[in-house]
Image: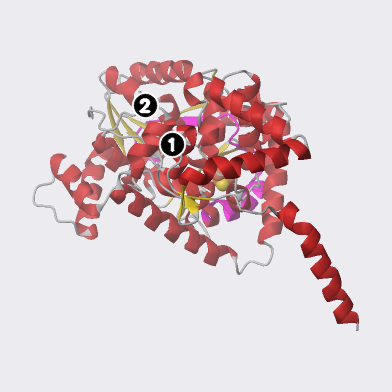
Amino acid sequence: MNVPKEVDHSQQDLSERSHRALQDEFLRSAVRFTVDRLRSKKKSSTEHIPHWEDLREQGRAIRSHTIAHLDAYLGQFAKHVRAAGGQVHFATDAREANARVLEIVRQKEARSVIKSKSMVSEEIEVNHHLEAAGIDVVESDLGEYIIQLAGETPSHIIIPSIHKNREQIKDLFTADGGADLTTDTKVLASFARRRMRERFLQADIGMTGCNFGIAESGTIVLFTNEGNADMVANLPKTHIVLMGMERVLPSLADLEVIANLLPRSATGQKLTTYMSMITGTKRPSEVDGAQELHVIILDNGRSKQLGDEHFQEVLNCIRCGACLNVCPVYRQIGGHAYGSVYPGPIGAVLTPLLEESDAHDDLPYASSLCGACYEACPVKIPLHEMLVKLRQRKVRAGKTSPQERALMKGFAWGFGNHRRYRLMMKAGRLVQMPLVKKGQIDAAFGPLSAWTASRAAPMLAATSFRERWPSLEQTLTANKGDDKA
Ligand code: SF4
C-alpha cells in the first residue's frame, strides 16, 4: 500500500512545528479530549489499588535489574527462542534490521506483509523499505491502519491516530474502497474489519513487535486490544518479530507485575483485552501457528545508554504512553510536532539519545520540567532529570546560540552576588516602565517577545521581598508577642 506522505515536518525545527500545531484548534482539542479520558481512566483503575506505589517500585526494580544484566538475559532469551524452533537475528541499526527483513521476505518469495502495531517498526521505517522493494504492507491495528492510509506517522505511542476525527477517517476509508460510508463508528469499524479479513488471508508474512520477550522461556508477549496480533502471528506461514533489545523480562513472574502496570498506565484498563504469548514455531500437535519464526533484535543506539549513570534508566521504559498523557506540552502540540517517532517526554529524551544528531537537540526543551511525567511513569523513570542532563550536554558541547550564552552569563553574573542582584532588579524596574500596561508586561522586545506573544508577564514589584523583609519581620515579631500575651 503506497501512500504519499501527507505530513512532512522534517524540514522544520521544533519551534516551527509547535507553532504550526498550536494554530490547529482541531488537533489541540482532539488531543486534549483523548488524553483527558485516558488520564481519568488511569486514575480510576489505579486509585483503588492500595499497593499501586509498591507495584511501581517493583516494576522499577524488575526493569532496572533486567537492564543491568541485559547481556545475560538477552542471551538466555535467544537460546530459548532457538530451542523452540525460532531464528534470532541481532541488528546493530535500522539499516541492518531492514536488510534482514527484506532478506527473509525475498527468501519466502513473499509479496505481502501484514503487521500489528510496533513502535520499533516505525523507528526503522520498515514499511517504506518494503514498499520500495515492491512489497505490499498493511497495518492491521485500526489506529495504525488509519494513519497508514493518511501517509502519516503515529502521533501517540498507544493511540496512533489520536489526532483524527470520524469524518477524516470516513474519507480515508472511502478512498480505500469503502463506498457509501457514514461516520458511524460501527460502520467504520465493520469496513475496517472486512478489509482486514481479506488481507489476513492473503498475507505471506506476518510482522509484529514484541512488548516483552521472556528470557526463561523464549516467549514473545504481545498486548493488544483488537486481537489482531494473534491473527498476524498465526495465520501467515512466516512470522517476523521486531524487538528492541531492551524489551526482555527475566521470567513470567516478572511479567505478572508488568502486565498489571502497563494497561492501567496506558489506557486505564485493569488488563489488556488480549495478551498473546507465542513460544516458538507451530508444533505438529497444534492447529495454528507460524511454521517459521524470525526474531530480529534491534540495538539502534540503545546499547550506548548501558552503563551511563544518567541515561541507562531510559531503557526501563515499557512504552505505556502515560507520560504523554500528563505532559502539558504534549497536550498542546500533539505528537507530530516532536518530529520523531517517539513523542512526548519519553520521545524528548529517547530520540536525542538514540539518534545523536543535531536535528533533535531542541527536543529536551519541549518540557516545562514540571515532573508530571515522572509521577505518571509506572516504572518511575526520572525523565525530568534526564531532560535537564540533555540540556546540560548541549550547553557543554557549545551548541547554544551566542545570545543565549551571553544571557546566561549575565544571569550568572547578576545572581552570583546579592549586591549585583539588587542592582539588576533596580535596573529591571526602570527598563520595564515603557512596557507595562495595567500592571503587566504584554509586549516585550527581543527574545522576550516570544514569551509575551501569547501571554503577559508579571511586572517586577515596586518593592522587592528583600526590601520589604525588615518591616515584615518587625510585624511578625510584634504579632508573636501579642499571641503570647
Ligand atoms: S517513560 Fe514511563 S510513562 Fe513514559 S512511556 Fe515509558 S514507561 Fe510509560
Q: Which residue is nearer to you in this view: 106 or 284?
A: 106
Return the x and y of residue 480 as percentages of the image width and height. Answer: 86, 74
Q: Quick check: is 248 in the magenta stretch?
A: yes
Residue at the spot 82% in from the left edge and 75% down from the top edge: 479
Nearest the eye: 456 or 163: 456
Please state, as top left, top right, bottom left or bottom right, where the C terminus lies in the image.
bottom right
For badge 1, the amino acid type reads Ser
- 448 part of magenta stretch: no
Left or right side of 318 for 139: left
Q: Which mark, by number, is residue 118?
A: 1
What span is colored magenta in the figure? 234-263
Residue 12 bears which disc, if any? 2
Q: Would you say the residues marked 2 and 1 are in contact, meaning their CB atoms lie under 8 Å apart?
A: no
Which label belongs to residue 196?
none
Category of crowding for the residue at label 2, using alpha-carbon neighbours closer than 10 angstroms: few (below 14), some (14–19), many (at least 20): some
The x, y position of residue 295, in whole percent, is 50, 28
Q: Secondary structure at mark 1?
A: loop
* Residue 22 in view in this figure: yes
Q: Which is nearer the eye, 443 or 231?
A: 443
Q: Is residue 118 above or below residue 143?
A: above
Q: Quadrant of the N terminus?
A: top left
Is the residue marked by circle 1 packed among few (<14), some (14-19), or many (20+) residues within 10 Å? many
